[in-house]
Amino acid sequence: MVESWKKHHGSKFSLQYIYDNNLVDKIKGFELKVHSDGNFTADMVLKGGLGAADKFVEFKSWKTGSFSLLNGTQYKNQLKSYMQSGNFEQIFDANKLIKDGVTNPDNFVKQKIVDMIKNNADEFWNDENVRPFFIKNNIQSLDKLKEINTNSNIISNFKSK
C-alpha cells in the first residue's frame, strides 16, 4: 500500500509539472530508452525542435532522506547514461522537500548534486563515455570538475519545482 501511494504521488508530481510547463504537445513518450543498450529509461522524452536533440527528463519525488541514494551505484549509472545523452533534466519535487523543512529546495538539490559529483569526480571523469559531456560544458580537466559549484553550467540540468 505504501509503495502504491509513493507511485501515485510521484505520478501526480510529474503530471502537474507537465501541465504547469505546457509540455503536453512536446512529449515524444514516456519510459523510453535513453540509449539503444536499454540500460535506462527516461520518465519522459521531449521532442527536439528544429534539429535539436530530444530531451530526456527524469522526475524525482524524494524526501530529504532519499538523497543518500545519490551515492549509490544505480543512481550514478543512471546519471552517466543521461550525461551521455547530452540533453537531459532531472526535476525534483520541491513540495516534498519543503515539507521536510528545506527552505530553498532548488539550492538544496543543486548542492547535493555538486557534492556527489565532486566526491566521485575521478569516477565520472575517467568514464570515456561521460567525459565528452563535461568537455562540452567547458570542464576541460578533472581538476576543473572538482571545482564545480551550484552555478556551474552542468548543474542547470537539475531543478526543484
Image (cartoon, rainbow, N blue to C red):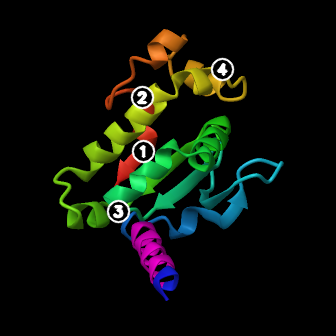
* Disc nearer the start of the sequence (4/2): 4
Residue that mark 1 sits on:
158
* Residue 52 place in picture, x, y as percent: 63, 41
* Disc nearer the start of the sequence (3/2): 3
Count of marks, rendered view: 4
Local packing at callout 3 (Cα closer than 10 Å; few below 14, some 14-19, many 20+) is: some
Question: Element type at marker 2?
Answer: helix
**Principal SS element in the magenta part?**
helix
The answer, for residue 3, to whether it is visible in the render is yes
* Disc nearer the start of the sequence (4/3): 3
* Separation of marks 3 and 2 at Cα, in angstroms: 25 Å
In the drawing, what numbered circle is on residue 3?
A: none
**Residue 16 part of the magenta segment:** yes
In the drawing, what numbered circle is on residue 126?
A: 4
Question: Element type at marker 3?
Answer: loop
Assess whether mark 3 and mark 1 are in contact (beta carbons under 8 angstroms): no
Residue that mark 2 sits on:
153
Q: Is residue 144 above or below residue 111?
A: above
Q: Residue at x 49, y 64 (%)?
A: 23
Q: Which amino acid does label 4 sit on?
A: Asn
| Magenta-colored span | 5-19
In the drawing, what numbered circle is on residue 63?
A: 3
Q: Which amino acid does label 2 sit on?
A: Asn
Local packing at callout 4 (Cα closer than 10 Å; few below 14, some 14-19, many 20+) is: few
Assess whether mark 3 and mark 4 are in contact (beta carbons under 8 angstroms): no
Q: Name the quadrant containing residue 40.
A: bottom right
Local packing at callout 1 (Cα closer than 10 Å; few below 14, some 14-19, many 20+) is: some
